[in-house]
Image (cartoon, coloured by chain):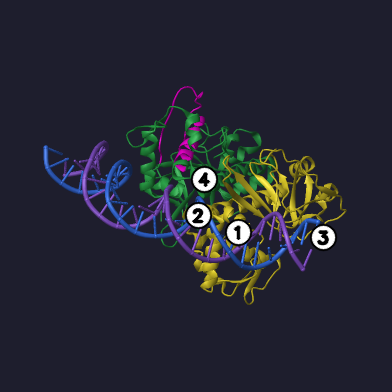
Chain colours: A yellow, B green, C purple, D blue
Amino acid sequence: MNAPNQTISPNCSDCPIRHRAVCARCEADELQTLEAIKYYRSFEAGQTIIWSGDKMDFVGSVVSGIATLTQTMEDGRTQMVGLLLPSDFVGRPGRSGTPYDVVATTDITMCCFRKKPFEQMMANTPHVAQRLLEMTLDELDAAREWMLVLGRKTAREKIASFLSILGRRDASLKQDGNSGPMVFDLPLTREAMGDYLGLTLETVSRQMTALKKDGVITLDGKRRVTVPDMSRLMEEAGDDADGGVFA
Amino acid sequence: MNAPNQTISPNCSDCPIRHRAVCARCEADELQTLEAIKYYRSFEAGQTIIWSGDKMDFVGSVVSGIATLTQTMEDGRTQMVGLLLPSDFVGRPGRSGTPYDVVATTDITMCCFRKKPFEQMMANTPHVAQRLLEMTLDELDAAREWMLVLGRKTAREKIASFLSILGRRDASLKQDGNSGPMVFDLPLTREAMGDYLGLTLETVSRQMTALKKDGVITLDGKRRVTVPDMSRLMEEAGDDADGGVFA
DNA sequence: GTAAATCTTTGACCCAGATCAAGTGGGGTT
DNA sequence: AACCCCACTTGATCTGGGTCAAAGATTTAC
């Protein structure tokens, strides 16, 4: 269906992901194999990277761009079950398929490893399996936190939770020393936000407007968000002050 | 807070969990250590096994009884994020705490391993880490499937999804050759079901009545459910015929 | 530069599920 | 047997968010 570009790159120095993903250890001696089997792959905005049920012959990390994990019912209702931002890992070592679609929301580049050799390497390198386990536990925590959002929060709280998570993710990526107001771009349309939050796009729009009116956020255009007071936003989200995990 | 009973048992022959959990391999040579450090722990219905935020110094499997994983907001809204049935594994190797409460719903017995030695063993036994990873991926799939339920399904579909998952879990435990109608007991109150499904207890009750009236299920008392036609139930749940994963 | 296609906002109305408020019924205890 | 305690059911009403519809506002295409 999609014919992705595919380029081989000899080293990982341009991966901005050392600190989170597996790729983080590309230079460790025992992982030189990773370096050897690594390749880059790009997809255009809107392309489906993997279809639900398809076999997936690689694992990898997002280098730049954004993708979503979505589940769809026969009648078209869809729920986003994950958001892949730069540095996030995709892949299910030991599994052949995915139970959800992976869709590029923007143009996206990924750093990939073919699954077979990756798994082989995993079997020989205990700490990689442990690292993978750790990442998977993070994702599980995030998914469970999101269950609370979906099951029990109001529309306003859902939007605030989303913005809060996104803002924190964004800040940690660009290593903001959280000084001053937080500014970031929404990587999703109102409809995609609705699919993440279990809301309609109209409700998303209305609640964004309401948060703006109440001074919780500022909008510059439709997509650029400024949060003058993070703790205020988290209060709106109904979170404990400490905030939560989200990958 | 809770002072659980604690008994040391010399072997795992009474664990009905060989096929799923880590304990499954108690007899493998390389895992004799597991046998050595194993112990049993019992909790009464209603006891909180671990409080959110507490450190958790063990991992283990449920031998008998049922426990729930729940998250609670300051104002008391709660969302169940997982259900632990016999054979399910609890624990976060490499993590010190849990981000949710683990509560015994019935009297429960668990087969536990102290975390330190368990982790040590994990580091030396690659396939255990891989097994753990696999189990965690299962849980992640289940959590994501549940996100679709919470975010996009109607009350009736939620109830049907819950019954369908529970019925299948129950059948696989007692190795039913799915012959004839499926019968099982609800391990949860209407309120707990509501907390799982993001509904109020009244809505749960009403939808149960409606499913009964429409012949999708039969109720014997409040808790015993009969499903005459499983595919009918799954249709009500809005699932693809193949059904989904749930741990 | 204008047209077409999106994405977003806003308004009017409606309905599924929440909330509030009585009941019902079974299982213990004395 | 009479009482209590809980889990559960059922009814009446309310409301947050969905649905339907119609404009803006941006971006893309030619």
Asked if disc 2 and disc 4 are in contact, CB closer than 8 Å, the reply is no
Residues behind callouts 3 and 4 on a single chain? no
Q: Earlier in the sequence, mark 3 or mark 1?
A: 3
Q: Could you tell me which residue is drawn at 79 percent across and 58 percent down?
A: A15
The chain letter under disc 2 is A
Residues behind callouts 2 and 3 on a single chain? yes
Figure quadrant of residue A16: bottom right
Quarter of the figure with the N terminus of chain B: bottom left
The residue tagged 2 is: A148
Q: Amino acid at mark 3?
A: Asp
The residues bearing labels 4 and 1 have C-alpha atoms spaced at a distance of 21 Å
The residues bearing labels 1 and 2 have C-alpha atoms spaced at a distance of 21 Å
Q: Residues within 10 Å of mark 3 (few under 14, many from 20)?
A: few
The residue tagged 3 is: A14
The chain letter under disc 4 is B
Q: Could you tell me which residue is drawn at 55 percent across and 71 percent down?
A: A212
In this picture, which residue range is highlighted in magenta?
B158-187
Q: Amino acid at mark 2?
A: Leu
Figure quadrant of residue A87: bottom right
Q: Is A35 or A107 nearer to us in this picture?
A: A107
Q: Amino acid at mark 1?
A: Arg
A231, above or below B117, in the image: below
In what element is the residue under mark 4? Answer: helix
Residue B183 at what x, y percent from top left? 42, 29
The residues bearing labels 3 and 4 have C-alpha atoms spaced at a distance of 39 Å
Q: Residues within 10 Å of mark 2 (few under 14, many from 20)?
A: many
Residue A220 in sight in this render: yes
Residues behind callouts 4 and 1 on a single chain? no
In what element is the residue under mark 1? Answer: helix
The residue tagged 1 is: A190
